[in-house]
Amino acid sequence: MAKKIVIANWKMNPDSVGRAIRIAKEIENNIHSSKNLDVVIAPPYVFLDSVRLTVKKTKLGAQDSFWEDVGPFTGRISWHQLKRLAVQYIIIGHSENRALGETNEEINQKINAVLGAGMKAVLCVGEVERRNDIVFPQIIQEELSLGLKNIKKRFLKNLVIAYEPIWAISTLKKAKSDNPKNVFEMSILIRKELLKMFGKKTAFSTPILYGGSVDEKNAAEFVKLGKVDGLLVGGASLNANKFTEIVRKVSGL
Ligand code: PEP
């Protein structure tokens, strides 16, 4: 059975280290360790060390990282520093960063550095809107082909793709979750693109996650009917009860 992955993307929340520790502790206390499931918390950088000291079964993630290891880069945080903090997963190319100007070329450099360091890179891809008059699969294909350009084949075993349609992200005013049928179709499109770029092995073995308004009610459907390998959870991951219920649903499949 392929390993499942459920990642909590806390974004710029919560507002204090005490709250971060409390949520992490509740999650940690309510999950079981399993070799078939990675549960990952990606808190803001400033809480990483406190969360690290709080959890054991839960793995540590980061929400971004710079491509250089150390040096004169004011305000940046490197994969190297994150690795030393025991971070295993790094989210790259989240739509909220793309919206602030992050380019596919920068994303490509970050992915290259993270994978080169033997860490898991979670590349986020997704269309801004879905309408009949726009060719949205093209956007996903472009994000994949540019984001993964010239990545060495031997690094690909640590690649994870998160399909996150931007219109489904819960913080948007009119957000609504996608449906499992679309998610399944998009996962096929992503695998076809990986097949073109890297061949069969990568196409079939790369975990694909879904993210966008996932909660404890729809989590199981997305994984089971959408046939994805896990979930990237934003809003609901700040509520330890909801998040552990999502994890419970996924681990029961
Ligand atoms: C996200 O932004 O990565 C995300 C999945 O958010 P939400 O679950 O809140 O839609």
Image (spheres, helix red, strand yellow):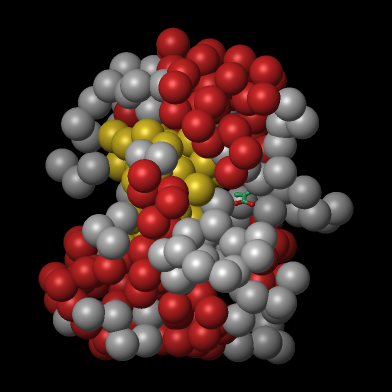
Q: How many numbered discs?
A: 0
Q: Is residue 245 visible?
A: no
- Residue 111 in view here: yes
In screen coordinates, is 174 left or right of 169?
A: right
* Residue 178 horizontal/vertical position (percent): 60, 55
| The C terminus sits in image quarter | top left
Which residue is more in the foreground, 98 or 132?
Answer: 98
Residue visible at 68% across and 82% down in the picture: 132
User: Where on the picture, by quarter, is residue 22?
Assistant: top right
State the image quarter where residue 110 is shown: bottom left
Along the viewing direction, whichever of 150 and 253 lies nearer the viewer: 150
Left or right of 45? Residue 19 is right
Q: Residue at x 37, y 34 (%)?
A: 59
Residue at 44% across, 28% down: 52
Is 44 drawn above or below residue 167 in the view shown?
A: above
| Residue 68 place in picture, x, y as percent | 45, 70
Q: Going by the image, does 212 lie left or right of 120? A: right
In the picture, residue 109 is in which quadrant? Answer: bottom left
* Relative to 108, residue 224 above or below: above
Could you say where residue 15 lies in the image, as x and y percent from the top left?
77, 31
For the view shown, which residue lies furthest in the front direction? 72
What residue occupies the far right of the structure in this picture? 173
243 lies left or right of 201: right
Residue 56 image point, x, y percent:
34, 21
**Residue at image x 39%, y 18%?**
31
- The quadrant of the image that shows the N terminus is top left
Q: Is residue 104 above or below residue 117?
A: below
Q: Nearer the viewer, residue 253 or 63?
A: 63
